[in-house]
Amino acid sequence: MRKVLSPVMNPNQIAMRLSAFRNFQLPSKSTSVFKRTTTSRSSSVRKMSTDQKFVQSPHKLLVIPGPIEVTDEVLYANAHPSMSHMSLDFASVFGDCVRMTRDILYSKDAQPFLIAGSGTLGWDQVSANLVEPGENALVLHCGYFADSFADCLQTYGAQVDQIKAEVGGMVKAADIESALKSKRYKVITVTHVDTSTAVLSNLKEIAAVVKKVSPDTLVIADAVCSVASEEIQMDAWGVDVVLTATQKGLGTPPGLSIVVASQKAIKVFETRSTPVTSYYASWKKWLPIMKAYEANTVAYFATPPVNLIYAYHASLTQITKGNVSLEQRFKLHQEVSRRIKDAAEEIGFRNVPTSVEARANGMSALYFPEGFVASDIVPRLLKKDVVVAGGLHGAIKDKYFRIGHMGISVVDSRRGDIDKLINALKETLAEAKASKA
């Protein structure tokens, strides 16, 4: 059972921590364990070693839709010794991250932007760099996060229309086609997985409709809750921008905004007729930085989150070069998702998405059984060391809760995370029923 450590450590715990950190050595980009080797009295060479293993402290099982559980290697990489962001050693790691980010989206030439910030910064990047004041934007609405993206677009002067699906439903392709025929839109945005409803939109189908009806319209995917847990074929499907963040399927601590733009989108940015209306989010500032790092050189605009880049690198390496292929990873997410959703429905919960096709593979949103509320379920799960998330969508906020099942919890069955979650759901509902009997 995972337990929360007391804030006060006993002397043995303190000694163990001090011993671990005294042996810290600078990691290379291929492993996650550190060691310092002294070569002279005046200089030292830090390099990776595999003779020391780091295991993170026991803790409650985190199964919210992000942040998610991360591997020991990723967490340890986040403790990398301080590095200059202008060093060539760091540049090579950053450059690798750019390339591996592109690989996860099956793109050959899209341009990744890795910038300190939350996933929300991706909205600003799209709104500031690709939509000029007065231009039209079409937002497909499957939950809370579409409203927020629309608000961001309007903040930068866009004229925004929305097509709203019923709660738990997807926007129909026919409605999208009709809207695109009625007006010229600079961008269309879709929340690939809306974290408020666990609805998975058919990104491939939406992109195909846009390509057929309005090929100049840029397809923007808010994929914060889908990258690395849902398949995205950026080039093949014709998706122009994918925005995401590190703390969900990418299995890294929060703090990095990741936006990947097609060359078509880059050209739209480069040929805009008005200045970019943001300073920090401007691709005019960041594009040279990204190109420099990928070329293993350095350039400066703002300090990147150096340690987080090392952690992200560790996770990307596991995802793209580990024992489980990217294709197998997606299949495992599908299998685990079905298992959790089926188990929940068998004992009386009900999925928020209104069809099987609309169900995300990296998370679940479950209605409480009739007669039960959040206080009957969520605190009991917490007592079993299982942390879930409450409702978020305003129309149903008090009627449901949300579970995240992404990354290492899904890929490594030896951890037992999914078994623990399902057993906790069954025991919790049985206890809640008994308390009302």
Image: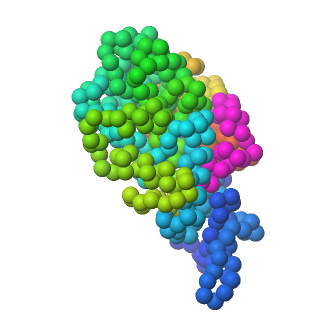
Between residues 234 and 284, which one lies in front from this camera angle?
Answer: 284
In the orientation shown, which residue stands out farthest toward the bottom? 41
Q: Position of residue 201 (x, y in %)?
A: 50, 24
Tell me which corner region of the image, top left, top right, bottom left or bottom right, holds residue 136.
Answer: top left
Confirm whether residue 18 shows in the render: yes
Mostly what secondary structure, the magenta segment?
A: helix
Q: Is residue 349 above or below residue 389?
A: above
Between residues 234 and 328, which one lies in front from this camera angle?
Answer: 234
Q: Residue at x 29, y 42 (%)?
A: 276
Q: Please give the count of numbered marks on the rendered protein.
A: 0
Q: Residue at x 44, y 27 (%)?
A: 219
Q: Is residue 314 magenta?
A: yes
Q: Residue at x 69, y 42 (%)?
A: 411
Q: Position of residue 417 (x, y in %)?
A: 66, 44
Q: Residue at x 66, y 45 (%)?
A: 319
Q: Position of residue 214 (x, y in %)?
A: 41, 17
Confirm whether residue 340 shows in the render: no
Between residues 59 and 357, which one lies in front from this camera angle?
Answer: 357
Read off the magenta span.
Answer: 309-335
State how the image is colored. Answer: rainbow
Q: Is residue 46 above or below residue 344?
A: below
